[in-house]
Image (cartoon, grey):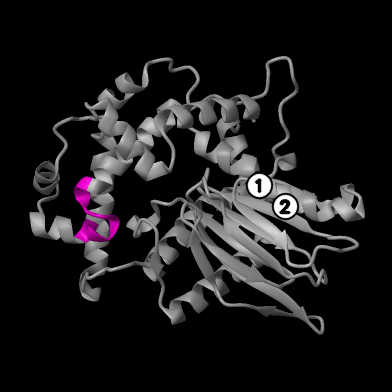
Amino acid sequence: MQSKDETSVESNEHTALKCVIDIDTSTAPAAEQFDLYRSWHANLVDITLLREKFKAFAARERVWQLGNLVLLSVSYPGTGYRRRWSNKKNPVFDHWCLTVPRRLVVGTEVVGRLRWRCLAVPHEDESEDDGFLSLLLPRDFAFSQPFDLAIRPEMAAFIADYILLLHRSLPDRTERDVEYITTATTSLLAACITPSRNQIFEAEGPIDAVIMARANKIIAEQLSDPDLSPDKLCRALNVSRSRLYRIFEPAGGISSYIRRQRLLRTRDILSDDIDKRSISAIAEEWGFMDASAFSRTFRREFGMTPKVAREMGWRRLKHLRTAPEQAPVNVGSLPLNALLMKNYLAGHFNSTF
């Protein structure tokens, strides 16, 4: 006789993988459809039409959550309007975005070249396609250069092909497959994406990748330890200072990497409306003893002061949470903005989704 846990696992293995968001513009009047489409990405990019007058803008967006990765499919076939999009001046998210444009030519799909950018830095581009696929990755993915990636042309084509194949395979996948898809995708992209200014010899790459993974685990476990230092890491990893510094050079150096992780932790705590401690007390907990210096460093990293980050985080959290007397929110009805924020808050707060 099977236990409840065994029955749950078996059921999960046969549950078809479903997209968590499936929305289209058909619910809006024709003249308002583009504005509705633009609102889906309001916290990610600013989108404008280079031709103002249009009869309609039929678009559909579907999103799949694959662990900490998000695959986005957007189609607006035959709209014929050239669009300009740019990253937000005060970004909420700092994900990597790998995008594959798609066009229909005489009924045949033609795939464009892979585009990539970090949502946290200024970027502007134009496009006139029939849709696109985007894979959104955490900014700290694969110890990459903070704001830029160096992808060889042949690897860019390979990644574009993989994203297309991944998208086409999703109808045949189950919820149980998500763990394996995430692991396989992360490993493949880590092998294809090399940090900018990466001077590591190709032969040492796999070994250094293991060292970085071990270092990241130690840093995560000991982040609140005031004695956490490059020297302590070297002893724990049994590597020289020069090698550790070289491995983390693309991330701005080991000290910068640790400082950024601590800043990210303070940002998480500031977004928690349950934690009422002062900003200076939170900063001190994570090794920032000088409140003024912390505020300057925080603003340089995230483009806003800790006070503003706290206010924005609390407002956003209050908006996303469902009041006890309300029915649970249907994730399938949420726009991409809310899904990414939900992922960001996952593990830190008990929101109702």
Residue 201 vs residue 338, the one in the foreground: 338
For mark 1, give the secondary structure.
loop
Residue type highlighted by circle 1? Ala
- Residue at 62% across / 77% down in the picture? 112
Q: Is residue 232 found inside the magenta-colored segment of the image?
A: no
Residue 175 vs residue 65, the one in the foreground: 65
Disc number for residue 42 = 1
Q: Is residue 173 visible?
A: no
Q: Is residue 112 visible?
A: yes
Residue 146 is left or right of residue 169, and the answer is left
- Packing grade of label 1 (10 A; few <14, some 14-19, many >=20) is some
Quadrant of the frame with the C terminus: top right
Q: Is residue 248 found inside the magenta-colored segment of the image?
A: yes
Measured as percent of width and height from the top left, residue 267 is found at: 41, 33
Outermost residue on the bottom side: it is 106
Q: Which residues are magenta?
A: 247-255
Measured as percent of width and height from the top left, residue 183 is found at: 45, 55
Residue 60 is left or right of residue 248, and the answer is right
Disc number for residue 38 = 2
CB-based contact (under 8 Å), mark 2 and mark 1: yes
- Residue at 48% across / 17% down in the picture? 274
Residue type highlighted by circle 2? Arg
- Residue at 47% across / 52% down in the picture? 120
Residue 294 is left or right of residue 149, and the answer is left
For mark 2, give the secondary structure.
helix
Above or below, comparing residue 315 to residue 111 in the picture: above
Disc number for residue 164 = none
- Residue at 23% across / 29% down in the picture? 287
